[in-house]
Image (cartoon, grey):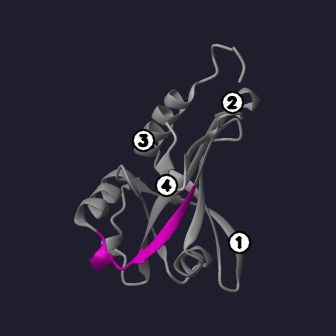
Amino acid sequence: MTNDPTVRGPEQRKKDVLARLAEEADIWVASAGGADAPYLVPLSFHWDGTDIWLCTRLTNPTGRNLSTGGRARLALGNTRDVVLLGGEVTTLSVGDVPTRAVEGFAAKCGWDPRGSGPAYAWFRVRPTEVEAWNEEPEIAGRHLMRDGVWAV
């Protein structure tokens, strides 16, 4: 790690990641599963402090991949201020999602999927790995979570 005072330490990176999860409305979702090719799309999301909640149609490639693949890779930010998250995916019907998660999603995203019909499913992504860095000087030490445990 460099002595550059603008390089964030791991504690600050974790704080910044948690703030972005709370504030940002959209996240890049990369998924693969079954016979579908890997797929990358932006989706609205809600972070409840433990899990990332996504909602999309089961009939589109992302919905199919998330429901059959069991894992997803998520990204926030641009290519110079990166947050990458890997996680385990659980598919839930609207009736199985905690009310607090649905209401948090609706408040944050301005859309309540409960009114969009049965074609929509919910996906809970529980992070198992988190990486964060802002340009090259922060690449060292970018792993903030491994195997579902925060390193900081």
Q: Position of residue 56 (x, y in %)?
A: 48, 72
- The alpha-carbon separation of the residues under discs 2 and 3 comes to 22 Å
Say which residue label 3 marks: 23
Identify which residue is drawn at 45% across, 57% down: 45
Identify which residue is drawn at 57% across, 69% down: 71
Element at badge 2?
A: helix
- Which badge, 4 or 1, comes first in the chain's sequence? 1
Q: Amino acid at mark 3?
A: Glu
Q: Are marks 4 and 1 in contact (CB under 8 Å)?
A: no
Which of discs 4 and 3 lies nearer the camera? The answer is 4
Viewer-proximal residue among 118 and 21 = 21
Q: Which mark is residue 38?
A: 1
Element at badge 1?
A: strand
Q: Amino acid at mark 1?
A: Pro
- Which badge, 4 or 2, comes first in the chain's sequence? 2
Q: Are marks 2 and 1 in contact (CB under 8 Å)?
A: no
Which of discs 4 and 2 lies nearer the camera? The answer is 4
Q: Which residues are magenta?
A: 86-97
Say which residue label 4 marks: 148
Which of discs 2 and 1 lies nearer the camera? The answer is 2
